[in-house]
Amino acid sequence: MATHDLIVIGAGPGGYVAAIRAAQLGLDVALVEKEASLGGTCLRVGCIPSKALLESSERYAEARHGLDAHGVKFGDVSLDLPAMMERKDGVVKANTDGVAFLMKKNKITVHTGSAELTAPGTVTVHGAKGDTELVAENVLIATGSRPAPLPGVEVDGTIVVDSTGALAFDAVPDRFAVIGAGYIGLELGSVWSRLGSNVTVLEYMDRILPGMDAGLAKDALKAFKKQGLQFELGAKVTQATLKGRGKKRHAVIEIDGRDPLEADRVLLAVGRQPNTEGLGLETVGVATDERGRITVDAAFRTNVPGVSAIGDVIPGPMLAHKAEEDAVAAIEGIVTGVGHVDYDLIPGIVYTEPEIATVGATEEALKEAGTPYKKGTFPYQANGRARAMDRTEGNVKILAHAETDRILGVHVIGARAGDLIAEATAAMTFGASAEDLARTVHAHPTLAETLKEAALAVDGAALHI
């Protein structure tokens, strides 16, 4: 039996950040992870490898037909998919190795195996060499999430895959079907489209990017169609059947009320669900909701004293940066009694081309709540840096309260939108008004000037349109 101040279950962005912050605050920390590599889904088979492939595939696409206007000409451009995958794996290893280094640096004890709560404050680690019992005053659950299933569609790992499988194809599929038009489906659909697949995205809703600003999603749909992606919206997938043998093996996707769709590979990306099974929650009496998420209070505490939870296993956006913020707030709450995350200001980013980024309220939400608002928009096409980059597709929209001018939401589609949204998030965190952002000096020429101009546009004072 080993005794610690804190046991963290799960070494993803939430878990390992919690362990580091706890160690910084003087706690003796044990971290339990069932996988051999640290970093969780995000670092191993999610955020990091997908962004590596997005970057590589975008450069490949540019080399083929995007640099002529810059006076850069190539001969025949060919794809070396094994080399691209090797680079992706190298990026992943560098990140997971980095987390392992941080654990050693912060003197965090790491246990490899599956964790089970056997009593409040007691965790049994089921490892390859047997069981280890850990005891601590506080236990933090940060076990993340996994791809959600869809009735009638069985993931076989070869033809029908989840996001992990779509990161590791050994050849570019001729026909690639994506079920789900959210972040994951659009990103991975974009990767394989750039590399040569004929991509069809099937979405149950009548729009892409459910939950995002509708105007932003409409602009994104136009951009993706221009790139060659095909969309079937309002499409209810009822079944996927595998047919043929060997190289002719493929899937036939049944869609309610429509003709079947044949595909060589299928990505199921209809959301994620929390990893809460097998943790012994029932044994110690930790409460969960109807979706299997752990119920917590504002301080991330469960109904069982000494047991807390963060990240994808509790309600809220299933995003790595949300889990990290949860982690810091939960640990600081345990040690100092104070910790907080503003869930109204969690930015969301889709790393496609163009990038899509959003923070705060959408127009639809403001209308539904009856909140009076003003809107300012500014197109990338009118920005000098965007013209110089030949990246003029997109726009910035800022929503501000009609009476107080406080910024309520910012929505961006365009080059480096994921970087631009950080300024908007910072401004909103400190309660900035549109005028505050408009009067902030922005260097010229930069893409960030689109934010300033959109803020000016809230009061009809944009300078460059």
Image (tube, grey):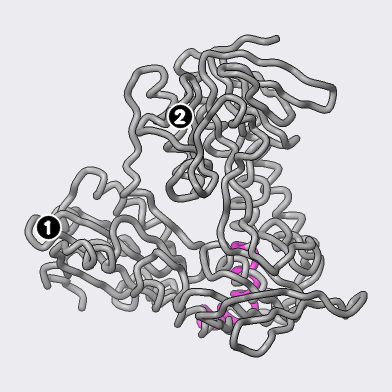
For the residue labelled by badge 2, is the local secondary structure a helix, a strand or a loop?
loop
Residue 107 visible to the viewer: no
Label 2 environment density (alpha carbons within 10 Å; few <14, some 14–19, many ≥20): many
**Residue 64 highlighted magenta (yes or no):** yes
Q: Residues within 10 Å of mark 1 (few under 14, many from 20)?
A: some
Please report the residue visible at 77 percent of the width from the left and 75 percent of the height from the top. 241
- Residue 427, position as x, y percentages in the image: 24, 49
When the figure is inspected, residue 53 is found, relative to residue 174, above or below; the finding is above
Placement of the N terminus among the 4 image quadrants: top right
Instruction: Tell me if residue 267 can be seen.
Output: yes
Q: Amino acid at mark 2?
A: Thr
Q: Please identify the dominant SS of the magenta region.
A: helix
Question: What label sits on residue 388 in the rendered view?
Answer: none
Residue under numbered circle 1: 405
Which part of the image, by quadrant, shows the C terminus?
bottom left
Q: Is residue 227 above or below residue 14?
A: below
Position above or below: 342 against 448: above
Is residue 291 depicted above or below 398 in this figure? above
User: Residue 415's spot in the image, x, y percent?
Assistant: 43, 67
Q: Is residue 161 left or right of residue 389?
A: right
Q: Is residue 198 left or right of residue 121?
A: right
Which segment did they paint magenta? Answer: 54-70
Q: Which mark is residue 302?
A: 2
